[in-house]
Image (cartoon, rainbow, N blue to C red):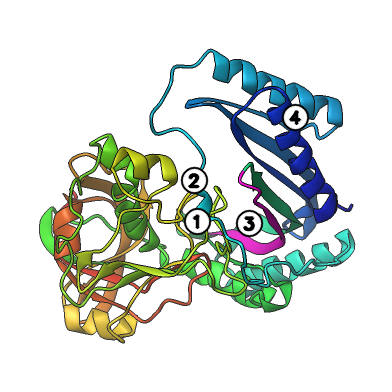
């Protein structure tokens, strides 16, 4: 099932902008996306679901001076497009003026941008997809007789295009693809049952981990959790395993977003230029990584994206700004309309095993439950599971505990970041070793 061509989508954006101008808008911007794909799940050796997916959407914002109106539609027929533009114009005419509303500055538009190699369509048939998913699930079930059940293995493949344009004369776009394979299984022994998973996700399907390695890792993780114990309440060092650690980085980016800053709803309010981590910490964003899962040559306002430090020598170097939040703060957009792209933190070149040995006694967290972060105060409290460590060695799995601290204290007490950063996804980090947290148990 094919998607509309980039040329056709570009023409839609041009027509949208022309229609907005005809209706009296002083400026406008529009985005159109279209994708098609396949999703297939097998469970216990049988095909459970097959879905051919097709998604498309269009959004437009129009400005009458500094009054803004927005509308969207999933119908890309010309009549529906005109109707969406008309609704956006009606909304704008009945909206109060906002001094910070408007397009990003024309001088910041991405006029020349690189091809980031983001599209590698996978011409896979449903039968071939079924075989790939079956290999993952079978590898998990074959690993150990204690793998008693499965929630299935799922293959997703999708490719399409994204186009953005505005009345500065900017129209740009690029094709994309994303492919993933996941497996979820249950382990069981002596009335104890545990569930765990593993997955991989890539732009280029050739680079996906093998189905067998994904299945085996899902099974190993489920087996390791069997016979978890509770801990007594205590203070302890805590290591967040690499696949859990991206959530800590997202807590940082949420706190330094411009919208959180101007609304004064951040535990890092007015922290620009302040040291918030130990001086060895460096955290970067690089939107221009070829085949990166979050790569983009321009942001959702057409602004050129560039690599940059968020944290350098432990100090906060920049907020994360789109043009609206930048104007609210009297600053300039950082090219982050639509979010942060390809975040990474430097490691201390220690593997997880070495980190456990150096920690000696403490908690290795491998699973978190609940939301548990107050974005204003930074107070952090999450349900957790993982492993208790003594003499640098894992002793037994633990469950039904809560870990708590304050996110600012956690950032300051970051002892080390591991080099075990080969986790799937757009956030690259190893395991995080936090000096001290409160563990609430029985």
Q: Measure the C-alpha gap from mark 3 to mark 4.
A: 53 Å
Q: Measure the C-alpha gap from mark 2 to mark 4.
A: 20 Å
Alpha-carbon neighbours of circle 3 within 10 Å: few (<14), some, or many (≥20)?
many
Give the x, y percent position of residue 437. Answer: 15, 58
**Circle 1 sits on which residue?**
108
Q: Are marks 1 and 2 in contact (CB under 8 Å)?
A: yes
Label 2: element kind: loop
Mark 3 vs 2, N-terminal side? 2
Going by the picture, which residue comes out furthest to the top?
94
- 167 with respect to 368 (left or right): right
**Circle 4 sits on which residue?**
19
Q: Residue at x 70, y 61 (%)?
A: 176
Label 1: element kind: helix
Give the x, y percent position of residue 100. Answer: 39, 34
- 181 with respect to 265 (left or right): right
Can residue 391 be seen by looking at this rendering? Answer: no
Checking the image for residue 150, the label placed there is 3
Label 3: element kind: strand
Mark 3 vs 1, N-terminal side? 1
Q: Measure the C-alpha gap from mark 3 to mark 2.
A: 49 Å
Going by the picture, which residue comes out furthest to the left?
235
Checking the image for residue 104, the label placed there is 2
Give the x, y percent position of residue 77. Answer: 85, 32
Q: Measure the C-alpha gap from mark 3 to mark 1.
A: 50 Å
Magenta residues, start to end: 168-186
Mark 1 vs 4, N-terminal side? 4
């Amino acid at each position: 099932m094919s998607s509309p061509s980039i040329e056709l989508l570009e023409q839609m954006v041009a027509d949208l902008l022309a229609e907005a101008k005809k209706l009296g808008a002083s400026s406008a911007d529009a985005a159109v996306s279209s994708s098609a794909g396949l999703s297939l799940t097998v469970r216990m050796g049988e095909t459970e679901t097959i879905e051919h997916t097709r998604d498309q959407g269009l959004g437009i914002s129009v400005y009458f001076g500094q009054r803004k109106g927005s509308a969207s539609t999933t119908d890309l027929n010309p009549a529906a497009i005109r109707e969406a533009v008309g609704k956006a114009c009606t909304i704008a005419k009945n909206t109060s003026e906002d001094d910070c509303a408007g397009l990003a500055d024309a001088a910041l538009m991405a006029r020349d941008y690189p091809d980031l190699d983001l599209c590698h369509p996978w011409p896979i048939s449903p039968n071939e997809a079924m075989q790939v998913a079956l290999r993952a699930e079978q590898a998990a079930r074959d690993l150990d007789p204690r793998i008693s059940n499965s929630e299935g293995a799922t293959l997703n493949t999708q490719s399409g295009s994204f186009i953005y344009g505005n009345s500065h004369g900017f129209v740009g776009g690029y094709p994309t693809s994303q492919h993933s394979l996941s497996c979820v299984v249950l382990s069981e022994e002596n009335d104890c049952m545990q569930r765990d998973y593993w997955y991989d996700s890539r732009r280029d399907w050739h680079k996906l981990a093998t189905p067998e390695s994904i299945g085996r890792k899902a099974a190993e993780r489920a087996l390791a959790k069997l016979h978890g114990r509770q801990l007594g309440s205590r203070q302890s060092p805590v290591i967040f395993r690499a696949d859990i650690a991206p959530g800590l980085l997202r807590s940082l980016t949420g706190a330094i977003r411009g919208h959180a800053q101007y609304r004064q709803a951040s535990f890092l309010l007015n922290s620009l230029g302040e040291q918030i981590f130990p001086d060895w910490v460096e955290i970067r964003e690089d939107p221009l990584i070829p085949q990166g899962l979050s790569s983009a040559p321009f942001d959702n306002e057409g602004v050129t994206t560039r690599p940059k430090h968020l944290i350098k020598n432990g100090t906060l170097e920049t907020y994360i700004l789109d043009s609206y939040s930048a104007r609210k703060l009297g600053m300039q957009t950082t090219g982050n309309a639509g979010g942060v792209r390809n975040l990474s933190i430097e490691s201390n070149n220690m593997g997880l095993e070495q980190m456990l040995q150096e920690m000696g006694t403490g908690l290795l967290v491998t699973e978190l439950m609940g939301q548990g972060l107050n974005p204003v105060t930074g107070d952090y409290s999450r349900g957790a599971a993982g492993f208790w460590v003594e003499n640098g060695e894992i002793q037994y799995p633990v469950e039904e505990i809560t870990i708590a601290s304050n996110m600012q204290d956690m950032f300051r007490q970051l002892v080390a970041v591991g080099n075990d950063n080969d986790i799937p996804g757009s956030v690259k980090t190893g395991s995080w070793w936090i000096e001290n947290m409160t563990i609430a148990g029985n």
